[in-house]
Image (cartoon, rainbow, N blue to C red):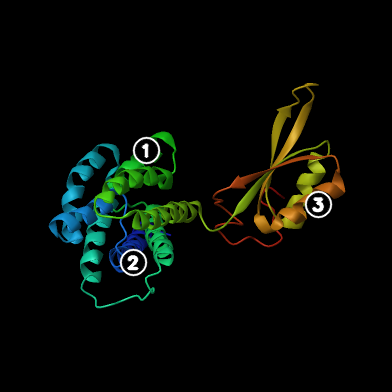
Amino acid sequence: MSRTTRTCWDLLMIVLGCALYGFGLVYINIANHLAEGGVTGITLLIRYWWHLDPAYSTILLNIPLLIVGYKFLGKRALAYTVFGTLMLSAWLWIWQRVPLTINLDHDLFISGVLAGLFGGFGSGLIYRHGGTTGGTDVVARIVEQQTGVPMGRTLLVFDAAVLTISLTYLNIELMMYTLLGAYVFSQIVNFTLDGAYAAKGLLIVSDKSQEIATAIMNELERGTTFLHAEGGFAHDRKQVVYAVVSSTEIAQTKRLIEAIDPHAFISILDVHEALGEGFTYQKKRRRLLFGH
């Protein structure tokens, strides 16, 4: 995929993400009197106190945060953030003028879950393609870059602070369902960022490492890597096999290993995202990653 095509794809996904986020905010949060976290939550506070359209207050509040972002974010990330902020404001303006009603029979539990789903999936798409919707998203992205803390976790902390202030116009019941939505939001964001293709990493310690590696490559068509290790007690040198397989292949992999060496030590790790042949690309049939 060329750089121009990739950029166009990223921008299209940011538009779609903003549309989903704005849809949930207008038709779920606002319609059911649920608050929101971060700068978006502040726009709802302003809407309640001074009746200013969130489409406009979103831009006004983001100006100082974008100035901060200019110092820490690269030109591309900043451009995507400005684009995302403008798209969110545009969709908020559009959705508030589309005569649509979603009848949830005043079920606040469903409303909270749906608010988290729409907001989390929409925001996750935006983050996954290099953008943000401005606001605390900018701060969360900087925190992730500097400390490695997932954006969803940072956003949850900011949400809690803003939601506390939102108690000025929410009762406890609405606040609890808003917190439910905030939790679902953070989980969906992390799920979307981690990638839908679940994978598992295996560290295999065995005296028959070569046979195990060959079996994995032949039977599963997955690549293997040898790591040189030393035992902590006897100080004997070992070849550790490292392989990444899909979650559905774990059982088959364990059977292969057990058939070769029933005493092999296996450590299975969660791999949040797997990139490369066999995961993001189509596997070459009957071809080994590190084979002949």
- Is 290 in front, or is 183? 183
Residue 26, picture quadrant? bottom left
Q: Disc 2 on helix, strand or loop?
A: helix
Residue at the image point whose x is 61% and y is 46% from the top:
270
Label 3: few (<14), some (14–19) or many (≥20) C-alpha neighbours in 10 Å: some
> Which numbered dot is residue 28?
2
Question: Helix, strand, or loop for circle 1?
Answer: helix
Return the residue nearer the eye: 212 or 113.
Answer: 113
According to the picture, the residue beneath numbered tag 1 turns out to be: 143
Give the residue drawn at x 25%, y 66%. Answer: 91
Q: Nearer the viewer, residue 14 or 95?
A: 95
Lower position in the chain sequence, tag 2 or tag 3: 2
Q: In the figure, is residue 268 to the left or right of 208? A: left
Percent coordinates x, y for residue 182 in the rendering: 39, 53
Residue of label 3: 256
What whole-number distance in Å separates the C-alpha atoms at marks 2 and 1? Answer: 29 Å
On the image, which quarter does residue 265 sit in?
top right
